[in-house]
Image: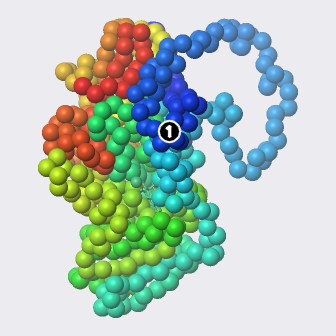
Amino acid sequence: MVSLSHPGRLRRAPENFLDDAQVRAVQSGRRDFLRQALVAAGAAASTGALAQATGEKLILEPQPHATTLGQPVAATGYGMPSKYERNLMRRESPGLTRVSAASVAFSPLQGMFGIITASGLHFERHHQGWHDLDPSQHRLMVNGSDETLLKRPSVFTIDDLMRMPAVSRMHFIECGANTGMEWGNVAVPTVQYTHGMLSCSEFTGVRLRDVLDFCGADYRKGRYVLAEGGDGSGLTRTIPMELVESGEVLLAYGMNGEMLRPENGYPLRLVVPGVQGVSWVKWLRRIEVGDQPYGAREEVMHYIDMMPDGTHRQYTSIQECKSVITSPSGGQTLLDRGFYNITGLAWSGRGKIRRVDVSVDGGRNWRTATLQTPVLSKCLTRFSLPWVWNGEAAILQSRAVDSTGYVQPQMRQLRAVRGTRSIYHNNAIQSWKVAPGGEVSNVQI
Ligand SMILES: Nc1nc2c(c(=O)[nH]1)N[C@H]1C(S)=C(S)[C@@H](COP(=O)(O)O)O[C@H]1N2
Ligand SMILES: [Mo]
């Protein structure tokens, strides 16, 4: 048994890493704030007063809630988190975009348990803002790029789709730009901003394959589908037919046991397990079967990987194996020497997580972490490793291996191949430095 008799205490990360002046600087177009913000976040973590333990009074004296009548049932028809959890929120990174309708809100990975993201904390990425669509006024059209590719072009209501056989599956969704700010150097202080374009839910819907079968798609000639969103961004993405034929691609209306949230595409979104978020088209309005990739705007202008030799790669859609320690993580402070449960998340767009190794000395020595069940394909996997912090400097890293045998690369290995001009598909090993004072910060080694 690990020394639970000396449990270490941990101060949580400051959630907003930019002060008002820095936010104003960003809004006026300046972007040199990130380095300063990092210093500021460290300073904030090392000041703040420690809460005093109130001791036995709480046990020995009857508390108000034990001597009064509580709130009635259904006081809130839809339950909300405790007011004491108000700090745990998805947040926008003020430096990233100038317009909040075309932006990202990051999931607070540092405060989440298990593998499922509470629906209200699911990250958001919109190109043109979100809408709360009336499901009775929404339609999905399914057609072929010419009449030979699909025998029965059809228009479905949400009710039509909900009457068809449904499946529920747990999968992660990660934006291809997740960790994209870190390509050049350390950019943001906390795991919310380094890795928070990542969420995991149980999705419910109809297999796209079943709908294409129903419409009489020609799978021999029709090797691609185009998915089109209903919002003003005109977002379209090509999906290879193999993925559809595998039965994994869903026309989803459900998320975590209820209808999708408006921010996440209510009433219908595409679920493309293992593939980067941009292909999970929200407010889905049309599916077209075609015989070649479409070369849409989000496939030739954006979501491409800039290579060091000046060329770029297209259609690198699968999210490769990746992991991150969510606690201890950047912005937190270890207040005592003693026991800490190192924990984090691992995932792979190619299948299951086979193993996660954790290092506390910057990658010289590795120990195999425990994987929490269930370990599912194309789903987040929670890992943990007990650790006794002796008060010395440490560098924490996690390295995931997936069911194909692929090993998550060190940052320098990834840069050797990909250079530093990319935005997308940074799946490098994340390093958190623990200073002798206990402050945890984002570093690259
Ligand atoms: N119609 C539409 N679908 C969309 C987008 C969008 O702006 N419009 N953004 C895409 C991108 S880039 C990502 S990463 C995911 C984000 O999904 P989420 O907001 O549910 O997290 O949705 C994708 N689907
Ligand atoms: Mo994205």
Q: Residue at x 49, y 50 (%)?
A: 103
**Residue 159 appears at what percent x and percent y?**
58, 75
Q: How many marks?
A: 1
Label 1 within 8 A of ligand 2 by Cβ: no
Instruction: Give the quadrant of ligand 2.
Output: bottom left
Question: Horizontal placement of 174 versus 284: left or right?
Answer: left
**Residue 172 appears at what percent x and percent y?**
40, 50
Quadrant housing the N terminus: top left
Q: In the picture, residue 121 is in which quadrant?
A: top right
- Tell me: residue 385, above or below residue 276: above
**Residue 45 appears at what percent x and percent y?**
50, 18
* Colour mapping used in the image: rainbow
Q: How packed is label 1: few (under 14 Cα within 10 Å), some, or many (20 or more)?
A: many
Q: Amino acid at mark 1?
A: Val
- Report whether residue 119 is seen: yes
Q: Residue at x 47, y 47 (%)?
A: 97
**Residue 397 appears at what percent x and percent y?**
29, 27
- Tell me: residue 364, above or below residue 317: above
- Tell me: residue 372, above or below residue 313: above
- Report whether residue 331 is seen: no
**Is 133 or 41 nearer to us in this picture?**
41
Quadrant housing the C terminus: top left
Q: Residue at x 46, y 19 (%)?
A: 42
Q: Residue at x 61, y 67 (%)?
A: 133
Q: Determine whether the residue tagged by mark 1 lies in a helix, strand or loop.
A: helix
Residue identifier under label 1: 26
